[in-house]
Image (cartoon, rainbow, N blue to C red):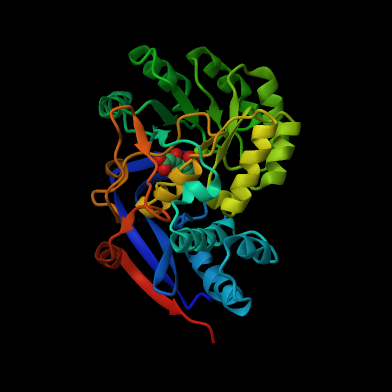
């Protein structure tokens, strides 16, 4: 059997509410849906790169280029169908983890559908429900933020992550804690600080945060280790963890006590599972981060988050938290326990609605073996 055809679609979807981080405010996002076809089966993947190189150096356009000119030709030249073979062969190309992950995910979905199994079974998942957290962006005012947090708590989310940046940090945490003294709470800086700001960051120790995510830029493992020595709040690394190697280095250096796993950031599920397994061995808990994915990418995340060392609530929210109409049926919903059920149908276990995908598509290309 060989992959007969790969399709890329470049989509744009507006958010139900703007999302602001230390990078700036976004009203919606672009992403790429990858489809891999053979023998009447279609595997779906999603590329989580964003329009601008802010969270990482990749963009929707660079990942399209890497997929079209390097990764898709590789799949056809080497007759790859197995995601693990793809992972190994794609290593010859440096970087570009989000482009690689998008295609690898499509091959995982394809493989699982062909075997008639949900992905979580193939990965060795052990949880049927995933504790759901919500990531809350920076708002115009503190009362706006408190109202928004309240409405998410009313919906049943189990933990809240707020975005911080210089000037929207200590006072913000103080006000959120005053209003929500018992809510599991954490803060994410997306690399907006440096060691020069250590005194501000150390004040966050007063607010009983589950963790402080990525205070410094991605390549500052050493500086994170210096800050962790002086803070009791566990540091969690997101942008800094690019592979199992950087996870090992971060743990050896004591740069963090918790790791956020995002399949796109680390270049696919093979690498994500290596990080998961290594952290489990070292007794370092992980949780699943999000990139405001469509339901396709989020369904993939649910299966991965089913692995046993995912020990904190995840940035995996219901479809309605992100988009007015998700690309899948049924939409992802919260249970009364503040969890999301891992889908049980074959592959990603949710059903992409082609009509909705087409409606949001700005550009589409079909690739076949030459
Ligand atoms: O840092 O975790 C982050 C979204 C885009 C880029 C980076 C991040 C995020 C989020 C959203 O926090 C989490 C979600 O998808 O719910
Ligand atoms: Mg983050």
Count the marks: how many?
Answer: 0
Whether residue 254 is situated above or below residue 303 in the rendered picture: above
* Among the 4 quarters of the image, the one containing residue 193: top right
| Residue 132: x %, y % from top left | 39, 33
Q: Is residue 250 left or right of residue 97?
A: right
Whether residue 213 is situated above or below residue 240 in the rendered picture: above
* Among the 4 quarters of the image, the one containing residue 236: top right
Whether residue 275 is situated above or below residue 86 in the rendered picture: above
Q: Is residue 159 left or right of residue 195?
A: left
| Residue 3: x %, y % from top left | 51, 75
Q: Is residue 277 left or right of residue 349?
A: right
Give the camera-side residue of 357 and 22.
357
Residue at the farthest front position: 116
Q: Is residue 271 left or right of residue 152?
A: right
| Residue 218: x %, y % from top left | 63, 42
Whether residue 129 is situated above or below residue 370 in the rendered picture: above
Residue 226 visible to an observer of this rendering: yes
> The C terminus appears in which quarter of the rendering?
bottom right
**Measuring 40% from the left and 49% from the top, which residue is drawn there?**
299
**Measuring 47% from the left and 58% from the top, which residue is drawn there?**
112
Q: Quadrant of ligand 1?
A: top left
**Measuring 48% from the left and 39% from the top, which residue is drawn there?**
306
Give the camera-side residue of 251 and 195.
251
Give the camera-side residue of 332 and 13.
332
**Measuring 41% from the left and 53% from the top, which residue is drawn there?**
348
Residue 21 visible to an observer of this rendering: no
């Amino acid at each position: 059997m060989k992959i007969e055809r790969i399709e890329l679609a470049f989509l744009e979807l507006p958010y139900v509410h703007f999302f602001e981080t230390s990078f700036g405010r976004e009203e919606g996002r672009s992403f790429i849906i990858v489809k891999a076809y053979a023998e009447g089966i279609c595997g779906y993947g999603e590329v989580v790169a964003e329009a601008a190189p802010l969270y990482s150096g990749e963009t929707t356009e660079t990942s399209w280029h890497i997929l079209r000119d390097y990764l898709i030709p590789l799949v056809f030249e080497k007759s790859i169908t197995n995601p693990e073979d793809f992972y190994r062969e794609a290593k010859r190309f440096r970087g570009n983890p989000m482009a690689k992950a998008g295609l690898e995910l499509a091959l995982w979905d394809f493989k699982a559908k062909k075997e008639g199994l949900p992905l979580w079974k193939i990965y060795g998942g052990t949880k049927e429900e995933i504790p759901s957290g919500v990531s809350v962006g920076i708002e115009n005012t503190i009362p706006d933020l408190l109202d928004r947090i309240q409405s998410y708590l009313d919906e049943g989310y189990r933990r809240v992550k707020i975005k911080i940046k210089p000037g929207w940090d200590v006072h913000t945490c103080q006000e959120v804690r005053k209003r929500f003294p018992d809510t599991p709470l954490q803060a994410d800086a997306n690399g907006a600080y440096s060691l020069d700001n250590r005194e501000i960051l150390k004040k966050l120790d007063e607010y009983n945060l589950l963790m402080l995510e990525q205070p410094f830029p991605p390549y500052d493992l050493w500086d994170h280790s210096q800050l962790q020595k002086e803070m009791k709040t566990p540091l969690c690394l997101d942008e800094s963890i690019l592979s199992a190697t950087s996870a090992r280095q971060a743990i050896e250096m004591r740069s963090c006590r918790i790791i956020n796993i995002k399949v796109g950031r680390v270049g696919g599920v093979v690498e994500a599972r290596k990080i998961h397994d290594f952290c489990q061995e070292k007794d370092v808990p992980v949780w699943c981060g999000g990139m405001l994915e469509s339901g396709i990418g989020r369904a993939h995340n649910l299966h991965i988050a089913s692995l046993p060392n995912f020990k904190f609530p995840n940035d995996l929210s219901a479809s309605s938290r992100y988009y007015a109409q998700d690309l899948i049926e049924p939409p992802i919903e919260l249970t009364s326990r503040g969890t999301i059920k891992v889908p049980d149908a074959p592959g990603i276990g949710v059903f992409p609605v082609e009509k909705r995908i087409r409606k949001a598509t700005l550009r589409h290309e079909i690739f076949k073996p030459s």
